[in-house]
Image (cartoon, coloured by chain):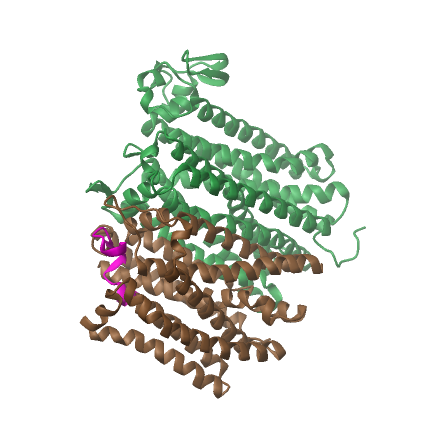
């Protein structure tokens, strides 16, 4: 692969991975913000719905919790916007041949994201951050709702775009370019539903662990206790719901789809070289692509076949039956990213389960080891999210559009964007992103140090 | 259908220039008009809640270019590589400067943020002008539909001239906005600045006519062949005249509106001069991209028009509601 393509790939990898850290939290946290605002606006002493039956004091505490998380949300949203703009541009700057080939199809979903999601998000975030007092509680709730809806709709169109690259449907090739044949076919791509659900539940679980971490942080210090209780309760329950949904049904169904449509990605993720009936599920092991073996393994016999096809002796295609020209460009990268995602997901599920049991028994707020674990768990949810995307994107290689266009053929021609241009901009982005990362950490640390109730009297 | 999308794209760029134009202009004037911290606080407070929404029009227009004319999108973005990457960095820097300045109450911090903010705002207004100038001038497209324009190739005398026009026109637009929305000394200073910048932009409009004819004679012959298109330069004159007349009478809101009309007039004149070309080739080379050879398939354009109308209607609704809330004087 010539060097300018490598540089283009590195630049996209850097910018998309750094950018995506912020939308994960935007999408996850907006859900919890909406919940806090809903309780504070629509809660009441005599509500029939149990979660909304709240005293005035609780409603006010939820309102304050929403205010605190809105400050963090604002910084995070800003970082997401400024790091997101380069992505749409990069399709054209560094992946011109890909844009030319696919614009007739995914131009739809990318433009829809702008028209249907970004406008709503950007307008209502302004109203939301102006605060509840300025426009009244109902406008405040509506803007919280629209911010949540905007970010989740935005994700739908982006995943619809990615789903088409993973599993192209509803197109025909005309003069060497993909043209849209059915609009509904594009929006109801069979790949799309599970990928979307899996991705959104991943974002929601990050939001849940971040909210829980905020609660644990103050609970461990004995400060801002009402706030800490609210955040721990919502965060831990959310964490349990979304870690479960993440694994079953969304992760399970998504994996089956990969097995059916992208056997090379599936075999790489599972480290399966030999096509087997009754393939084992590898818990740990190191793939050796030169000798085509998986070393030092611990495995559950026949489980892979069963999990994938619900038959203990089902046949799973291994990499040996796929020409090396169609292997992912790095099998170990796919394999290890997949282990990291699944491994972290399992650990997070156990933590969420333990915390929920303690919460239910009324002992969570006193269990310091579990509070410590909750306070420190959230970065791993981000790692799991990014590892999952690494599996999806490197598993799809060597294709940029599965079966239709190879990544190497999608880059801008060397005559327009030589490797040197790419290195220049890549270094510039790297420097700029270090600065953004530092500012982000600094601002968040200040908000957390100030705490949720800066003006209020200290807690008992 | 491609014609419809050409004009939809032009109108989205027009909305972008009118909306983000005023906050870019306010940014470029930030240190000149904002003499005290209170002035600067007032100016950034006015655009703070809306700049992000305004900028979305650029993103949405980029999406529509990708949807409607993928070949033009691919060629322009890869060919203008350096210019676009620099525009991206400026957009990032500008957003950071504007959003971060109120996070910390420290004069050095505010000065640092302000400096990034006004420099990048001014540079963006200039770069957008340069880009438009180079589209009009044409790009060295090859038979494969790609080109490469190094940064200094873009900064030809014509590119610089249109760049200067972009800077002046958007700064004038920003001054007109401040004259209308701000209060106190800031508004008075903005009003005076708007008057001077009006003269500068009127001068540049006249100065642009002949050079534009020399780089691309269709820009004028197109109007001779289709006299109805002369309505667009008419809009420019209407905007210019209206602005002066309303400012004399102290109607700052209407003067701002006239400035917006002027910007729309200039852009639509450029679009009418180019049509049906979307990315012309330089020096009469035959590889230019037109709405016919760069457009997406028919189904994409037809179905796109349906949801686009719905989506834009919603977006316009949001903007009206939001601006009414935010611009309601407390």
**Residue A332 percent across, percent down from the top left:** 46, 22
In the image, B158 versus B196, the foreground residue is: B158
Colour assigned to chain B in the rendering is: brown
Q: Residue at x 27, y 44 (%)?
A: A185
Question: What residue span does the magenta drawing correspond to?
Answer: B271-289
Q: How many marks?
A: 0
Let me know if residue A367 appears in the view. yes
**Residue A456: quarter of image:** bottom right
Chain ID for green: A
**Residue A318: quarter of image:** top left
**Taking A202 as reference, is A322 left or right?**
left
In the image, B210 versus A188, the foreground residue is: B210
**Taking B125 as reference, is B216 left or right?**
left
Residue B287 magenta-highlighted: yes
Q: Is residue A271 above or below residue B83?
A: above
Q: Is residue B87 above or below residue A347?
A: below
Q: Is residue A430 above or below residue B298?
A: above
In the image, B148 versus A288, the foreground residue is: B148
Let me know if residue B105 appears in the view. no
Q: Is residue A393 above or below residue A57?
A: above
Outermost bottom residue? B249
**Residue A381: quarter of image:** top right
Q: Could you tell me which quadrant the C terminus of chain B lies in?
A: bottom right
**Residue A355 percent across, percent down from the top left:** 64, 35
Q: Residue at x 42, y 63 (%)?
A: B163
Q: Could you tell me which quadrant the N terminus of chain B lies in?
A: bottom left
């Amino acid at each position: 692969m010539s060097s300018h393509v490598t540089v283009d790939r590195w630049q996209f990898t850097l910018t998309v991975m750094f950018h995506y850290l912020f939308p994960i939290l935007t999408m996850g946290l907006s859900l919890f913000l909406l919940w806090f605002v809903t309780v504070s606006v629509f809660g009441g002493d005599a509500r029939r719905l149990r979660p909304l039956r709240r005293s005035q004091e609780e409603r006010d505490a939820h309102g304050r919790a929403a205010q605190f998380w809105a400050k963090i949300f604002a910084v995070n949203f800003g970082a997401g916007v400024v790091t997101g703009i380069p992505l749409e541009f990069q399709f054209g700057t560094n992946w011109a041949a890909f844009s030319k080939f696919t614009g007739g199809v995914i131009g739809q979903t990318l433009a829809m994201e702008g028209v249907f999601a970004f406008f709503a998000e950007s307008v209502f975030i302004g109203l939301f951050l102006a605060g509840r007092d300025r426009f009244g509680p109902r406008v405040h709730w509506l803007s919280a709702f629209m911010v949540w809806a905007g970010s989740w709709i935005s994700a739908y169109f982006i995943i619809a775009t990615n789903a088409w690259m993973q599993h192209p449907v509803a197109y025909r090739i005309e003069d060497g370019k993909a043209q849209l044949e059915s609009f509904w076919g594009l929006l109801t791509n069979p790949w799309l539903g599970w990928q979307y659900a899996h991705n959104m539940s991943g974002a929601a679980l990050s939001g849940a662990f971040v909210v829980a971490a905020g609660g644990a942080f103050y609970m461990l210090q004995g400060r801002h206790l009402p706030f800490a209780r609210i955040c721990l309760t919502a965060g831990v329950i959310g964490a349990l719901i979304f870690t479960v949904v993440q694994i079953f049904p969304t992760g399970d169904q998504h994996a089956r789809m990969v097995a059916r449509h992208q056997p090379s990605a599936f075999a790489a993720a599972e480290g399966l070289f030999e096509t087997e009936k009754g393939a084992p599920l590898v818990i740990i092991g190191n793939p050796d692509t030169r000798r085509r073996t998986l070393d030092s393994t611990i495995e559950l016999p026949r489980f892979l076949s069963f999990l994938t096809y619900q038959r203990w002796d089902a046949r799973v295609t291994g990499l040996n039956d796929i020409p090396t020209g169609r292997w992912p460009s790095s099998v170990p990268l796919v394999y290890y990213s997949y282990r990291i995602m699944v491994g972290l997901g399992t650990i997070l599920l156990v933590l969420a389960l333990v915390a929920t049991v303690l919460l239910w028994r009324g002992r969570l707020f006193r269990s310091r080891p579990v509070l410590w674990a909750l306070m420190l768990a959230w970065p791993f949810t981000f790692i799991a999210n990014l590892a999952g995307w690494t599996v999806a994107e490197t598993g799809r290689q060597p294709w940029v559009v599965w079966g239709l266009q190879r990544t190497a053929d999608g880059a801008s021609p060397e005559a327009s964007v030589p490797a040197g241009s790419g290195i220049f901009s890549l270094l510039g982005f790297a420097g700029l992103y270090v600065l953004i990362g530092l500012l982000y950490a600094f601002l968040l640390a200040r908000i957390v140090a100030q705490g949720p109730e800066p003006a209020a009297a200290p807690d008992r | 259908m491609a014609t419809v999308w050409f004009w939809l794209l032009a109108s989205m760029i027009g909305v972008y220039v009118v909306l983000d134009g005023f906050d870019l202009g306010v940014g470029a004037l930030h240190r000149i008009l904002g003499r005290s911290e209170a002035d600067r606080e007032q100016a950034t407070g006015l655009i703070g809640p809306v700049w992000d929404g305004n900028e979305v029009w650029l993103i949405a227009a980029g999406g529509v270019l990708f949807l409607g004319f993928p070949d033009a999108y691919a060629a322009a973005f890869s060919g203008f590589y350096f210019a676009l990457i620099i525009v991206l960095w400026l957009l990032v820097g500008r957003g950071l400067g504007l959003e971060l300045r109120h996070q910390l109450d420290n004069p050095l911090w505010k000065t640092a943020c302000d400096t990034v903010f006004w420099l990048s705002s001014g540079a963006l207004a200039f770069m957008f002008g340069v880009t438009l100038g180079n589209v009009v001038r044409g790009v060295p497209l090859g038979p494969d539909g790609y080109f490469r324009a190094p940064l200094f190739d873009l900064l030809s005398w014509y590119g610089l001239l249109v760049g200067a026009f972009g800077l002046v026109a958007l700064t004038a637009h920003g001054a007109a906005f401040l004259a209308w929305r701000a209060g106190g000394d800031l508004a008075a200073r903005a009003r005076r600045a708007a008057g001077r910048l009006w003269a500068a932009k009127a001068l540049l409009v006249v100065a642009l006519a002949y050079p534009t004819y020399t780089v691309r004679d269709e820009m004028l012959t197109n109007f001779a062949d289709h006299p109805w298109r002369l309505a667009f330069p008419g809009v420019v004159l209407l905007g210019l005249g209206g602005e002066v007349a309303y400012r004399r009478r102290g109607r700052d809101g209407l003067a701002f509106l006239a400035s917006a009309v002027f910007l729309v007039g200039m852009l639509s004149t450029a679009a009418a001069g180019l049509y049906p070309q979307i990315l012309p080739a330089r020096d009469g080379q035959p590889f230019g991209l037109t709405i016919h050879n760069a457009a997406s398939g028919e189904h994409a354009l037809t179905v796109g028009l349906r949801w686009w109308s719905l989506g834009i209607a919603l977006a316009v609704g949001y903007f009206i509601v939001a601006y009414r809330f935010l611009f309601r004087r407390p």
